[in-house]
Image (cartoon, rainbow, N blue to C red):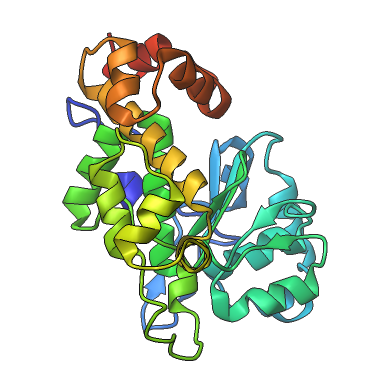
Amino acid sequence: MLLGAAEDDDGNPLYDVVTAALTRDAIPATNGFGIVPAAGPEVLATADTVVIPGTRYLPARRDGVLAPDVRAALDSIRPGTRLVSICTGAFVLAAAGLLDGRRATTHWKFADALRRLHPAVSVDEKVLFVDDGDVLTSAGLAAGIDLCLHIIRHDHGAQVANAVARYCVVPPWREGGQAQFIDRHVPAADDASTAATREFALRHLDEELTVERLARHANMSPRTFNRRFREETGQAPGTWIRNRRVDRARELLESRDLPVDEVARRSGLGTGGNLRHHLRRGFGMSPSSYRKTYQGT
């Protein structure tokens, strides 16, 4: 739904979304309706991105294997094609050997099963999604929304992703990871959420944001704050802040004609050189190239 809602300024779709299966027969869903695929497995050989939805497919979920027809279909995917799994779809990618040696996620309830069946996969059940370049995995079904918006943002920029989020009435990106949803004992009173402090940080990205300052805002010790922050977001505070600053810089480059040094200052990255470093490392582009790509100028 989200990829199909992505459009350019003239209302033209940015993705050609095709539902495919081993046959054209209706596939019974778990909630009383059937899904009629538009194509057979042959379409996988020409796809640029293949999305594996959440599944109860027993060979992969219970035994960590694939039936010959499923494996043959996945083997037809061209090298370099972007692979995406939603929720338990990660079991299919893992059974095909496509997650070996990679970091991946799935719904926290099934993370131990994925880890047991595929010890070569680095399973991280604390995050909403994992972007490992050409292979991306999401946690629960709702986290698939976060991942699809991330893909749109990567492909076409923040403005398109934000427009899709508004159309679907969902937030452009969510705070935290799925660690906050995992069943566990109620935390102690002094172990409060860092959500308010994360909101504070987003309003002050252009300022110095040390762990000590953030811990004071959260009324925690630095050690407690650091631990709680990692539990809720799956990232260290410094990594999370750096990523948010890069996100802010990207938004400014896409929507404003500010000098590069001013973009760096407003986003909290300090200097144009630092901004160039992060964009080249994350996207392989200079700020000027990024601006031209996403502003279409």
Quarter of image, res 22: bottom right
Q: Residue at x 38, y 43 (%)?
A: 209
Q: Residue at x 50, y 51 (%)?
A: 39
Q: Is residue 159 above or below residue 221?
A: above
Q: Is residue 81 above or below residue 114?
A: above
Q: Quadrant of the N terminus?
A: bottom left
Seen from the viewer's position, the closer of residues 13 and 242 is 242
Q: Is residue 167 left or right of residue 290?
A: left
Q: Residue at x 67, y 67 (%)?
A: 91
Seen from the viewer's position, the closer of residues 163 and 1 is 163
Measuring from the top left, give residue 82's x and y in whole percent.
59, 40
Q: Quadrant of the C terminus?
A: top left
Measuring from the top left, give residue 176's x and y in whole percent.
41, 61
Residue 98 appears anywhere in the view:
yes
Give the mark count. Answer: 0
Measuring from the top left, give residue 20's x and y in whole percent.
51, 54
Seen from the viewer's position, the closer of residues 253 and 161 is 253
Measuring from the top left, give residue 222's x and y in whole percent.
48, 61
Q: Residue at x 25, y 55 (%)?
A: 171
